[in-house]
Image: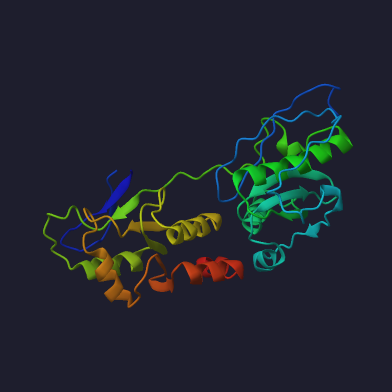
Amino acid sequence: MATRTVGLSSSPLRSLTSSSSHPPPTRITPTLSFASRLKPALALPLLSATPRRSARPRSPRVSAALKNLSETVPVSVPADSGELVRRFPSASGVYAVHDGEGGLQFVGISRNIAASIAGHRRSVPELCCSVKVGVVDEPDRAALTQAWKSWMEEHMTATGKVPPGNESGNTTWIRQPPKKKPDLRLTPGRHMQLTVPLEELIDQLVKENKVVAFIKGSRSAPMCGFSQRVIGILESEGVDYESVDVLDEEYNCGLRETLKKYTNWPTFPQVFVDGELVGGCDILSSMFEKGELSSLFKK
């Protein structure tokens, strides 16, 4: 696991140093792809562009309220991120993105539909003008895959072709995972004597960095659901942030108790912006759903 150590010198914590989105021939079988905003892409079976001769029963785990693609009403995508997250659900499901002329560009799956649409709006605004949404009940892998397949097959049966964004090799709609930054280490090791109090290191760290997240586990492998949720929110917002593992007793020994005293906040994760504690998972999630985080990070 890549990590970084906060260097200690006569001037405490002056620098942080690294240690470490024409109709095809009659018979083709295109390879399809889709992307999820917060989760890795799921492997889906190949679909044929040839109209189906017999309908297959749908998985009972797909919500009975999930409408056909043609019956679902498109919702326009606002430019304002706050309005966008209020207009679209943050639930799991399938979504179909249309351009300004109503042409279907892409069908995808997401664990957070609003976040995925927000990402498409930022990357390809000219193609993301309206979206049809289908929320899936009991959204396990099989149910989400079946919902996606249902909408894809309906479109292919009606048009004889695959949406452009789902064609093999098209990377317009697929969000490439960012390169993970290493987590920060506050000390060189638990057996090394500190010349600067740990509370002072915390104070300088949060004041010298725009966004700092104290989490359980690493950013690449969070050790609790709350930390995973916070990391997902920060990355969906495209925030450049520092992360510190409060469970690392080798290089962050004593951090949990010291940080609780420093912030007078008993739980983790804890997120700081411009040196001020914003809060934990509940507060960050509420601000994200209200569209308040973008303006906070831009200050």
Residue 127 seen in this snapshot = no
202 left or right of 25 in image: left
Residue 161 seen in this snapshot = yes
Q: Position of residue 140 (x, y in %)?
A: 60, 48
Q: Residue farthest to the right?
A: 158
Q: Where is residue 152 in the image (x, y as percent from the top left)?
A: 77, 40
Q: Which residue is drawn at 55% across and 43% down?
A: 40
Q: Residue at x 83, y 36 (%)?
A: 55
Q: Residue at x 12, y 54 (%)?
A: 191
The answer to which of 267 and 128 lies nearer the viewer is 267
Q: In which quarter of the view is residue 237 placed?
A: bottom right
Above or below, 262 relative to 25: below
Q: Where is residue 144 in the image (x, y as percent from the top left)?
A: 66, 46
* Colour approach in the figure: rainbow
The answer to which of 253 and 54 lies nearer the viewer is 54
8 left or right of 285 in image: left
Q: Which residue is drawn at 69% across and 45% down?
A: 108
Q: Where is residue 87 in the image (x, y as percent from the top left)?
A: 72, 65
The answer to which of 194 and 1 lies nearer the viewer is 1
Above or below, 216 relative to 174: below
Q: Residue farthest to the bottom?
A: 264
Count the marks: 0
Q: In which quarter of the view is residue 104 placed?
A: top right
Above or below, 171 relative to 116: above
Above or below, 7 relative to 40: below
